[in-house]
Image (spheres, helix red, strand yellow):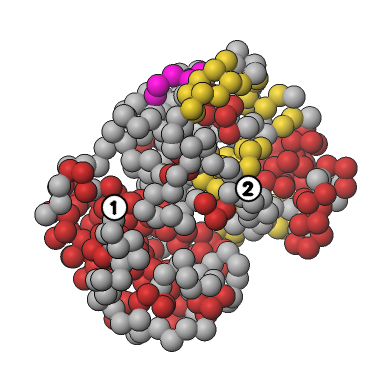
Amino acid sequence: MLDDVDALAAALEESREYTLSMYAHLEGGQWQVPLLEIVNPPIWELAHIGYFQEFFCRRWRTDDPGGRRIPSRLAAADSLFDSRTVPHDDRWRLDYPPLDAVYGYLRSTLDETLDALARSGCGERSRFRLALFHEDMHGEALLMTLQTLGLPAPNRDHRAPSRRKASALRDIAFAGGAFRQGARPDDGEHAFDNEKWAHEVRVAPFAIASRPVTNGEFLAFVEEGGYSRVDLWSQAGQQWLDTSGLSEPRHWERDGARWRMRWCDAWRALDTEDLVFHVGRFEAEAYCRWAGRRLPTESEWEFAATNGGDEVRYPWGDEIPPVEASLDFRDEGPGGGGAVPVVGRTGLEAMIGGVWEWTASPFAPYPGFETDAYAEYSAPWFHTHGVLRGGCFATRSRLVHSRWRNFYLPHRNDVFAGFRTCAL
């Protein structure tokens, strides 16, 4: 747990360096991006990261959750960079301070956060961890934006083709039973409100694939007309497909007799051994119908990831993720890249750090749900979004674990998300 002041301070500084590096290479017109549902203006998102940290680490108080008594260091920040009150589309029409002022704001907010952290007591550090993990999540979103818009990749190690042969696909059977799903209040780890708290869930016997679906396996679905077969798509999925006009996954295209895929601003041959990503839940469900399979529920996924409900944080145990887990934006790629993929105790591969994995479950509160200080983190998205598990190659290792819940609308295929299947 990041409760030690020095360790938490180092993590906050590293996260800010990471954030700044993601857009440091952008020039001129590359900062001006089109209004799209799935991205934010780069200057807005950078300033929002600083705003969130300043708000929760310096301004927020239990008796003043709106931070009204302590103003922001940046004029008009509340009306510009608060995601809770600034509508998404308005972010393209606001009058922002110069970029240099935003960078100065990011420096000052971090300095003040570190000062406040140094004076904090043990029971006061949850807000600093919240700011850290919020920034870590935005680090992944910044990369998603570069990928979505076809902008150059950051000037740091970044995703590469897997460079390894996919393992033979097999089913791993679980006998099912009761287990405690969710975060434990006494495990000493940070938990977001939607993970609270552990509660008993019973799952029936099931069999889940040893690894996620690969590009080559999904390509077979594409080449057999999977995107044009109405019988494979749900009604909502078909409506989305009609609107999107897609006949293959996002960022794929046929190049003569071969296929290729775009990564940021460069096209390269499709690696059929790599784990498929940039597919939404609608696409994953259609593939499952074509393959005679199904998506796991999030309870089944967590049961499998915790080795049948064991009290472990990762499929391989409680230790921090090894390098082969391919987290922290390393150069290995999904599933472990050039290294041997991490295999859990039950034989499941790439459960953590390969690709985000869609589940069949809607995003819903756990029993007894209560909002935390960041009340808007989960509650507005319940019952409309779907649950993803496992983290991807761009997810920070200190953030993700077997009980962590991510959530997106089912049509979102800009996410670094794929899926694994279950036997019917």
Could one spot residue 415 in this view of the protein?
Answer: no
In the depicted structure, whether residue 44 falls above or below residue 369 = below
Q: Which residue is mark 2?
A: 383
Which residue is located at x 72 percent, y 32 percent? Answer: 294
Horizontal side, residue 401 vs residue 102: left or right: right
Q: Which mark is residue 112?
A: none
Q: Answer whether residue 311 is magenta in the image.
A: yes
Which residue is located at x 60 percent, y 71 percent? Answer: 36
Q: Which residue is mark 1?
A: 127
Which three-letter amino acid code belongs to the residue tagged 2? Answer: His
Q: Residue furthest left?
A: 119
* Quadrant of the image occupied by residue 177: top right
Viewport quadrant of the N terminus: top left
Which residue is located at x 42 percent, y 58 percent? Answer: 138
In this picture, which residue range is highlighted in magenta?
A: 308-312
Could one spot residue 246 in this view of the protein?
Answer: yes
* Quadrant of the image occupied by residue 139: bottom left
User: Residue 409 location in percent, x, y?
Assistant: 63, 53
Q: For mark 1, give the secondary structure.
A: helix
Could you tell me how far apart the alpha carbons at marks 2 and 1 are, in whole angstroms? 27 Å
